[in-house]
Amino acid sequence: DTGVSQDPRHKITKRGQNVTFRCDPISEHNRLYWYRQTLGQGPEFLTYFQNEAQLEKSRLLSDRFSAERPKGSFSTLEIQRTEQGDSAMYLCASSLLGASGKETQYFGPGTRLLVL
Amino acid sequence: AQSVTQLDSHVSVSEGTPVLLRCNYSSSYSPSLFWYVQHPNKGLQLLLKYTSAATLVKGINGFEAEFKKSETSFHLTKPSAHMSDAAEYFCVLSGTYKYIFGTGTRLKVLA
């Protein structure tokens, strides 16, 4: 199975520490998305890339958050100076934007972050 | 503005009885709509999608959904619930570049 993979699956950190998550998309997919999901809620959009270009960032993505997708392959999401409010599941998804302009996003298993 | 409303936060059914999870949407253009399922501590799995082809869409595990433009609805159904269907279900509208999620419906299946 060559679906979307995320690493690590779980991360526990202390407030103020930096954390970095990795997402490996489905290999031929040109779009990659990051979402955040808190307990009991649906996922909320954070940012997305088309190839290596970061095209949109949500207002949820404060200046402590940064995402990269070098060479248009895997992506990393870094959170600096973590706060307890950052505790959530971070989901990555990838898609292939076709000529029709339509796409279907496929999700990874997520990284669950707990900030103590 | 685009939005998705899932009308029930919790639904309980007995095993072997039909399932109905309700979703209404608002969109200024012809939408793409999806249903995803999320089992505890897992990622989201695509159940089915509507992208302006047939209005009755069949998905995996016996689920189907019907797109009704006049009612702006995209309800998810299954004729006979199985214990393994217990999970959180999300109705999703595809916006210009991002997904807009409903708040989710937790399905409980009683033995």
Image (cartoon, coloured by chain):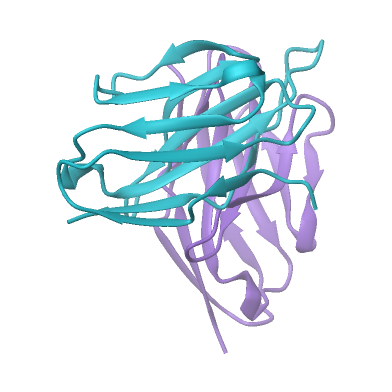
**Residue A82 screen position, x and y as percent:** 21, 40
Q: Quadrant of residue A65?
A: top left
Is A69 drawn above or below residue A27 in the view shown?
Answer: above
Q: Quadrant of the N terminus of chain B?
A: top left
**Residue B54 screen position, x and y as percent:** 84, 33
In the drawing, does residue A87 fall left or right of residue A48? left
Q: Quadrant of the C terminus of chain B?
A: bottom right
Nearest to the observer: residue B46 or residue B25: B46
**Residue A69 screen position, x and y as percent:** 55, 21
In the drawing, does residue A70 fall left or right of residue A38? right
Question: In purple, which chain?
Answer: B
**Residue A12 screen position, x and y as percent:** 30, 57
Residue at the image point whose x is 67% and y is 35% from the top: A25
Is A91 drawn above or below residue A69 in the view shown?
Answer: below
Farthest residue, direction bottom: B111
Nearest to the observer: residue B35 or residue B70: B35
Question: In cyan, which chain?
Answer: A
Residue at the image point whose x is 15% and y is 41% from the top: A16
Is B73 drawn above or below residue A46 in the view shown?
Answer: below
Number of disc labels: 0
Residue at the image point whose x is 56% and y is 38% from the top: A23
In the drawing, does residue A39 fall left or right of residue B86? left
